[in-house]
Image (cartoon, rainbow, N blue to C red):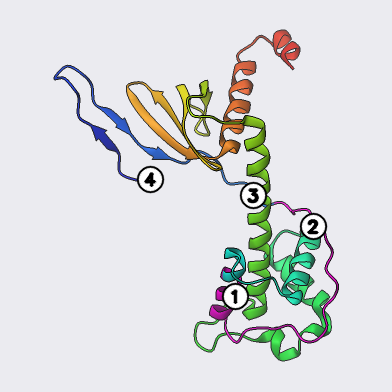
Amino acid sequence: MPEPITREPQTPLAPAITTITVSLRPPQRPAAPEEAVIPPRPDGLYPLPATTGECGDIWAEIRRGTRPLDPHRAYLKHLVAEALGQGLFYTAEVRPHIIGLLGDLLTEEMRTRNNERMRTEGGVIGMEIYYARDLLNKERERHEIRQAHDRVRPQVGQALGTLVWTDGKRATGCEVTAVDGYALTVRFRRGRSTYDCHCDARTIEAAQSRTREHAAGRLPRGERLLAH
């Protein structure tokens, strides 16, 4: 967490206001994204780099959009999405499953290829699978952010009232103070301190849901059932 920024009081009697930039969205277990197009199985051997470093550079270009997804990596991405959709989750499950499906697209040497010095578990092909999964997760995340943004429709000055964040504490006077594409800033108060939360619309939806749950939990049982 960055260092707090304390604003000096405007008058000798005015309290200082501490502003801390925080992220309040909890980490989530990755889900399998939906693949709209099934790429065909490519011809020829997989264009496997010599090192994991080269592998990372290729996928970084793909993520930035400066390099197109070649047929082999598009097929690999599809296989990873299918594996996640089937319920495979851990690397120890996903990696051998994908390598088996790649079949003759890999030689025996390619299956075990690794760096000469800084060896990596799973080797180069393991990193290819990792980066394909990472790309899928980022695409899923962008899709979720867009959907939440469309539902919340955040605007500067939008009052969100009192919300309960991930730490279970109430924040009052929540208000959207900045909208930059899908990046939002929500300002709120706790006691005499003011905080800025840099987040996206998913954070707001989660806080609103948590606030409703906390409110329902304080009702008598009969009223709580009616609230649902």
Q: Which mark is residue 141?
A: 3
Q: Residues within 10 Å of mark 2 (few under 14, many from 20)?
A: few
- Between the residue at mark 1 and the residue at mark 3, the CA separation in whole angstroms equals 21 Å
Q: Residues within 10 Å of mark 4 (few under 14, many from 20)?
A: few
Residue located beneath label 2 in the image: 35
N-terminal label among 1 and 3: 1
Does dot 4 land on a helix, a strand or a loop?
loop
Quadrant showing the N terminus: top left
Q: Is residue 104 left or right of residue 147?
A: right
Q: Is residue 180 magenta?
A: no
Residue range (magenta) = 31-60
Q: Which amino acid, mark 1?
A: Ile
- The residue nearer to you, when weighing 7 against 90, is 7
Q: Residue at x 58, y 46 (%)?
A: 27
Residue located beneath label 1 in the image: 58
- Between tags 4 and 3, which lies in front? 3
Q: Can residue 171 be seen in this view?
A: no
Q: Which amino acid, mark 3?
A: Glu
Q: Which amino acid, mark 2?
A: Glu
Q: Which amino acid, mark 4?
A: Met
Q: In this view, does 223 lie to the left or right of 82?
A: left
Q: Residue at x 60, y 37 (%)?
A: 202
- Between tags 4 and 1, which lies in front? 1
Q: Is residue 54 magenta?
A: yes
- From what the image shows, is residue 218 above or below residue 6? above
* x then y, percent, for residue 11: 16, 19
Residue located beneath label 4 in the image: 1
Q: Would you say the residues marked 2 and 3 are in contact, meaning their CB atoms lie under 8 Å apart?
A: no
N-terminal label among 2 and 1: 2
Q: Which residue is drawn at 60% across and 87% down?
A: 50
